[in-house]
Image (spheres, rainbow, N blue to C red):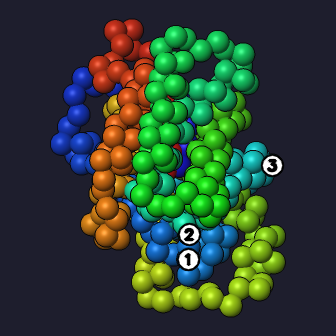
Amino acid sequence: MAVVMAASSISQPRASLRPKEIGALLLLAALWGGSFMFFRIAAPALGPIVVAFLRVLIAGGALLLFARFTGHGTDWRRTPRSFLILGALNGAIPYALTAAAALNMTASLAAILNATTPLFAVAVVAARLGERPTVRTIIGLAIGVSGVVVLLGWNRAPFDAAFAASVAASLAAAISYAFAGAYAKSAFAGTPSLTLAIGQQFGAAVVLAPVLIPVGIVGREDLSLTRGVAVAVIALALLCTSVASLLYFFLIRSVGPTKTLTITFLVPIFGVLWGALFLDESIGAATLLGLSIVLIGVTLVTGLRLRPRANGRRASAQSAT
């Protein structure tokens, strides 16, 4: 999930994290990393479109109830066109693509491929703003791509048409998140974080609604809503989306975007861990090597610094799940 925060809502970052902030960071990474496992469980039973639609609809409703219960005013219906675009780029498209990829790909591999979002984000910014990438960025991109090649080249799964389509879907989802971050920076400057989260979910639901029945339901005779599938969908919506959004905004306000950006490195680690623990997915040398190479590339591209800059400048941050 990529979200852009306005600078006015970000507090001055501190040199160290308090225990509750470390806990929030780890919990957020665990939740977003778990989303790939839940997609892997729910998508084969309900189909990608149905899973994506239920996720955003339930999550949006839960966040709206939270806003009403806590007295936070939200005006997410004021610019419906902008929220439709953001909902498509940051919800409907990547959620549906990630769910589709889960049909023929392990949760571990999907989580690692999703970590390429910052690599695509650099390319999107360069294309939209005409910024020339630095040598460090170019090296980081090359290393990140090589990590993907290692993952796919040494993968034990047969590289057939179905697997290739899943890889393409995962990378396309990462590209969509990258465009979402760039769009949100320009279209939602100063928008409260909770308004962004609610508007995005309902925008995604509206985008998915027209294709829900003709594409997601009609002609499918294998729809199966078991207890396990229902739990996976609810966990996707409430834990991996609603609760995760609140944790993300808490971290942005408490420790600043730079430290929160470390979530990019933690999510695929948890994705691999959950896949191994609950789905019996094997963790081979290729998985660990590919993951390490991708994260090295992301480190170079993002220029991540754990210590705040001396001038205390504030920057926007984005993250993907």
> Which residue is at 55% across, 57% downward?
159
Tag 3 near tag 1, CB within 8 Å:
no
The vertical placement of 299 against 235, above or below, is above
The amino acid type of the residue labelled 1 equals Pro
Mark 1 vs mark 2: which is more N-terminal? 1
Q: Nearer the viewer, mark 3 or mark 1?
A: 1
Residue that label 3 marks: 81
* Badge number at residue 44: 1
The local secondary structure at tag 1 comes to helix
Label 2: few (<14), some (14–19) or many (≥20) C-alpha neighbours in 10 Å: many
Q: Nearer the viewer, residue 24 or 95?
A: 95
The amino acid type of the residue labelled 3 equals Arg
The residue most toward the left is 19
Residue that label 2 marks: 103
Q: Nearer the viewer, residue 218 or 31?
A: 218
Query: Could one spot residue 260 in this view of the protein?
Result: no
The amino acid type of the residue labelled 2 equals Leu
Tag 1 near tag 2, CB within 8 Å:
yes
> Which residue is at 42% across, 48% downward?
154
Q: CA distance from mark 1 to mark 2?
A: 6 Å
Mark 3 vs mark 1: which is more N-terminal? 1
Query: Could one spot residue 218 in this view of the protein?
Result: yes
> Which residue is at 67% across, 29% downward?
124
Would you say 58 lies left or right of 217 here? left
The vertical placement of 261 against 306, above or below, is below
Would you say 274 lies left or right of 246 here? left
* Badge number at residue 262: none
The local secondary structure at tag 2 comes to loop
Q: Nearer the viewer, residue 272 or 23?
A: 272
Tag 3 near tag 2, CB within 8 Å:
no
